[in-house]
Amino acid sequence: VQLEESGGGAVQAGGSLRLSCVASESLFNFERMLWYRQAPGKERMLIADVLVSGRASYHDSVLGRFTLSRDNHASTVSLQMNDLKVEDTGVYYCKAETTSFGKVWEYWGRGTQVTVSS
């Protein structure tokens, strides 16, 4: 399974970006699709995830500003990020999860850089 992120870049605070993650196979194969952020010098942090049903959950720090959606047929998840803050800076990683034979299988993308300046 391959995941490829895109859409990162440099924006000013208050701006918007839309990240995309394209999978090499159907998203119906993955119960959860997730986005993580790794800020400089910090551990990777889960910021949002979406189930195959489309139900999404968010970290408190992005709630109301970020919207995560998935298109199972197009094998794509999208993270719309509005009202970006300097603290949103980091590398954003897409992850796919599926459970098989009692084990959780995880697949990661290589990440895309988001830089928010004041």
Image (spheres, helix red, strand yellow):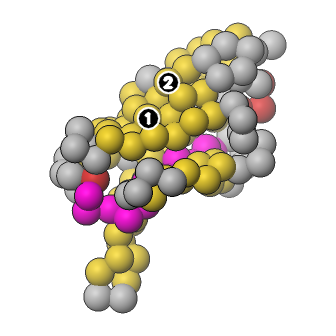
Q: Residue at x 38, y 65 (%)?
A: 31
Under mark 2, the amino acid is Arg
Q: Which residue position holds label 2?
A: 18
- Seen as rendered, the residue at the extreme left is 25
In the rendered view, would you say 38 is above or below 90?
A: below
Asked if residue 36 lies in the magenta stretch, the reply is: yes
Under mark 1, the amino acid is Ser
Q: In this view of the protein, which residue sits in the foreground, 80 or 13?
A: 80
Give coordinates of residue 72: x percent, y percent: 28, 47
Question: Is the C-beta separation of discs 2 and 1 under 8 Å?
Answer: yes
Secondary structure category for the residue under label 1: strand
Asked if residue 6 lies in the magenta stretch, the reply is: no
Magenta stretch, residue numbers? 28-38
Q: In this view of the protein, which residue sits in the foreground, 70 or 23?
A: 70
Give coordinates of residue 83: x percent, y percent: 72, 21
Left or right side of 30 for 80: right
- In the rendering, which numbered label is found on residue 117? none
Q: Residue at x 44, y 35 (%)?
A: 78
In the rendered view, would you say 8 is above or below 70?
A: above
In the rendered view, would you say 48 is above or below 98?
A: above
Which quadrant, please, contains the C terminus? Answer: top right
Q: Which residue position holds label 1?
A: 78
What main secondary structure does the magenta stretch of the protein show?
A: strand
Give coordinates of residue 89: x percent, y percent: 68, 30
